[in-house]
Amino acid sequence: MIELLNVVAPLAIAIFVVGVGLRLGRFAWALVTKRHFRGVSPTFESPPPRMGVIPALYAVLFGPFNHFYKRANPVWGRGYLLYHVAIITEVIGYTISALIVFANIVVGRPVPDVSLHLAESFNYSPANLLAIIFGNGEHLQAHFLFGEFGSLFIGVTWIAVGFAVVGNLHLMVALVRKWSGAVVGDIDRAAQGIRTPGRYAWDRIVVRTIIFCIIWTELFARLHLVPGIVYLHALLGLTLFVLLPFTYLFHMVYNFLAVFYAVRRRMARTIA
């Protein structure tokens, strides 16, 4: 597994960078062309009042769940909410860990050797670096990355792992029962009794299955149930990196931008 990671990692990162660059090209073109943010027409009689930043942000983040998902599809809605709390926490943790690791490499400091359980080494191989980043919830890696705050980081991310397990199980149940995109409950009185079937999507099935395996391999690695499983965990994480530019996962790249523009539209009441 270590040898495989050493070979695959550079290629996977190259595919990720090229894929993301191509996908962001459209956004870059939009930035350099002249566009106008319109909002509500000034001649519109009795326009709705502008919305503040905090209410607009709340409407963007929780409005769809409160108004639609938790009513139309409670199982999927709960999974959606718990899973996203977990994945945001985990991605932030991985990003900070990667920055710390590469900062140490730049200044020539030692890093842990995960396979040999050494606190200090100059093993800068891709497999070892990925094991440090994706295994940041284990004591050796957490102590190196966050020092005296390592135990706090492990505790916080344990909560995220719990949310991920429960949330992803909800989403897997919805996927298996073909509830993805389905309306299985009453949205409101006007739509009482209306039901729509769900669908199977190959990218959802593949990605959800990989994420399911990532969550459980992290759980096994944290509990030290399977020696060396952190490398499988890292390989699965690397697989998602390769798939990210070519599947619905790409929304993670521009998610902050999407939230920013959605909040602006809410504030200007372009969206009611």
Image: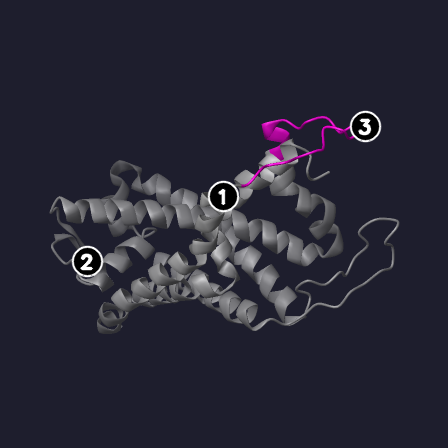
Residue at disc 2, secondary structure: loop
**Where is residue 137 drawn, in percent x and y?**
34, 51
Q: Nearer the viewer, mark 2 or mark 1?
A: 1
The answer to whether residue 152 is seen in the rendering is: yes
Which quarter of the image is occupied by the N terminus?
A: bottom left
Mark 1 lies on residue: 257
**Where is residue 120 drawn, in percent x and y?**
13, 51
**Where is residue 261 drawn, in percent x and y?**
56, 40
Mark 3 lies on residue: 45
Q: Amino acid at mark 3?
A: Glu
Q: Amino acid at mark 2?
A: His
Q: Amino acid at mark 1?
A: Leu
Mark identifier at residue 117 = 2
Q: Foreground: 42 or 198?
A: 42
Of the numbered discs 2 and 3, the one sitting upstream in the chain is: 3
User: Residues under labels 2 and 3: Cα distance?
Assistant: 70 Å
Q: Is residue 41 magenta?
A: yes
User: Residues under labels 2 and 1: Cα distance?
Assistant: 40 Å
Name which residue lies at 28% across and 70% down: 8
Q: Nearer the viewer, mark 1 or mark 3?
A: 3
Of the numbered discs 1 and 3, the one sitting upstream in the chain is: 3
Residue at disc 1, secondary structure: helix
Q: Say few, some or many: other residues with alpha carbon within 10 Å of mark 3 (under 14 / 14 to 19 / 20 or more).
A: few
Q: Magenta span covers which residues?
A: 35-56
Residue 170 as seen in the image, left or right of residue 11? right
Q: Say few, some or many: other residues with alpha carbon within 10 Å of mark 2 (under 14 / 14 to 19 / 20 or more).
A: few
Quadrant of the rendered image containing residue 146: top left
**Where is residue 187 drawn, in percent x and y?**
80, 51
Name which residue lies at 75% across and 51% down: 71
Name which residue lies at 40% across and 46% down: 92
User: Residues under labels 1 and 3: Cα distance?
Assistant: 31 Å
